[in-house]
Amino acid sequence: MSAVQDVGIVGAGASGLATAILLAEAGTTVVVYEAQPDLAALGSGITLQGNALRALDRLGVWEQVRGRSFSFDVTGIRAPGPEAPLVAEMPDNAMGGPDYPATAGMYRPDLAEILLARARSAGATVRFGTRVTALTQADDAVTLTLATAGGAEQVTHGLVVGADGLGSTVRELIGIGTRPEPNGMGIFRAFVRRPAGADHTELVFGGPSYIAGFCPTGPDTMYAYLVEDKQDRQGLTAAEGSRIMAEKARPYGAHWNDIRAQLEQGVQHVHYTWFTSHLVPAPWNRGRVVVIGDAAHSCPPTVAQGAAQALEDAVVLGDVLTRYDALTDDLWAEFHERRVPRATAVVEASDQIASWLLAHERGDVQGLHRTISDLVSQEP
């Protein structure tokens, strides 16, 4: 017996689809509402650390992810400049345990496709082009007003999960005023061909960018990124992004020579976003509505835990909803006890490292990474 028999999930990102999978496979009726018409425009690449891979295994998709990603166990650090000397190669901690690689890079739309197919095969319904415009709660149900191509409609569920990202409509509709705030940095990400020998993440700190890095995503692909002071780059086209990235990459050597040559020719996928940070104070629920993933917390990708924390939200929420037989105070207390301190530690560590970078300070980055690694190596 589950806590609720009918759940509406707003948002078809990683946390939303992961929650849908876990609840649907337990026999719960699940409908996912996604405002976008499809999952095509979901960015370039994503870095999945071991605890994210452990969560994906719980969802039953690890073997598919393994086959469509690129795994590695070391991170290289190079100095800025055309010679780009290798400063260090550091082994990555296998945060998911010995059954998984330390890190896997992946094309983000491939992960979305895998999760969507798994959710549907588990029995969840996923509706695209469906936007939530209003929400009302009764003692035993939540009613959503939806805007669709066919007009407005209303649906009722026993629980609503707001997994609708940084600009969460659900978060706003339930009166949570916490919103993502920019931290001063912006990041270019480009999906490019993987140069020969680029078989793990390499980072360069300094030069004209705060960070120049890349992460392999497949046998022939990877995503490259450059972090700068945030700028208003709304409407940036792939051609413009390629040109700007190529110019910013000029002072970097080694594999960046190949990356820069591709950018100069123009690449199809270039994205630009600001680093943001926020953390909804507990509780994350208001009655029968709860926010998770980027709707509840975000941080700069300085410890590469964004996707992992979103997936862990889903794993823990799915666990408590399928173990308890009602939406009790004890259920919500366990959920928040298992998630809020962990997410808080990740957000605070990510923010601290970003602050050191902005101030050009040499803080204890490795120490913070070790602290977070030790924390997330434990089951959520």
Image (tube, rainbow, N blue to C red):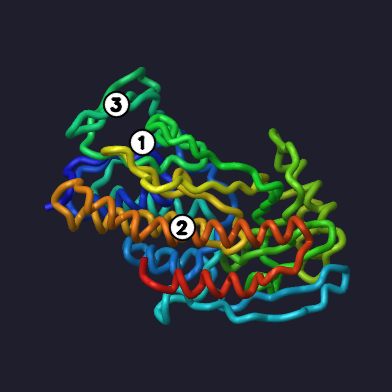
Toward which corner of the image does residue 160 lie, by quadrant? top left
Tell me the distance, in whole angstroms, between the alpha carbons under discs 1 and 2.
25 Å
Look at 56% across and 53% down and name the residue there: 299
Q: Quadrant of the C terminus?
A: bottom left
Q: Secondary structure at mark 3?
A: strand
Which residue in the protein does label 2 denote? Answer: 343
Q: Secondary structure at mark 2?
A: helix
Q: Relative to residue 206, is residue 290 drawn left or right?
A: left
Choose the circle earlier in sequence order: 1 or 2: 1
Q: Secondary structure at mark 1?
A: strand
Kindly identify the amino acid type of the residue bearing the numbered disc 3: Thr
Which residue in the protein does label 1 denote? Answer: 33
Query: Where residue 335 sits in the image (x, y, percent)?
Result: 31, 55
Look at 25% across and 39% down and name the residue there: 159
Tell me the distance, in whole angstroms, between the alpha carbons under discs 3 and 2.
28 Å
Which residue in the protein does label 3 denote? Answer: 136
Query: Where residue 139 sits in the image (x, y, percent)?
Result: 19, 32
Look at 38% across and 64% down and name the residue there: 55
Asked if residue 257 is positioned above or below residue 351 in the image, the reply reads below
Q: Nearer the viewer, mark 1 or mark 3?
A: 3
Asked if residue 360 is positioned above or below residue 93 in the image, the reply reads above
Look at 24% across and 56% down and name the residue there: 320
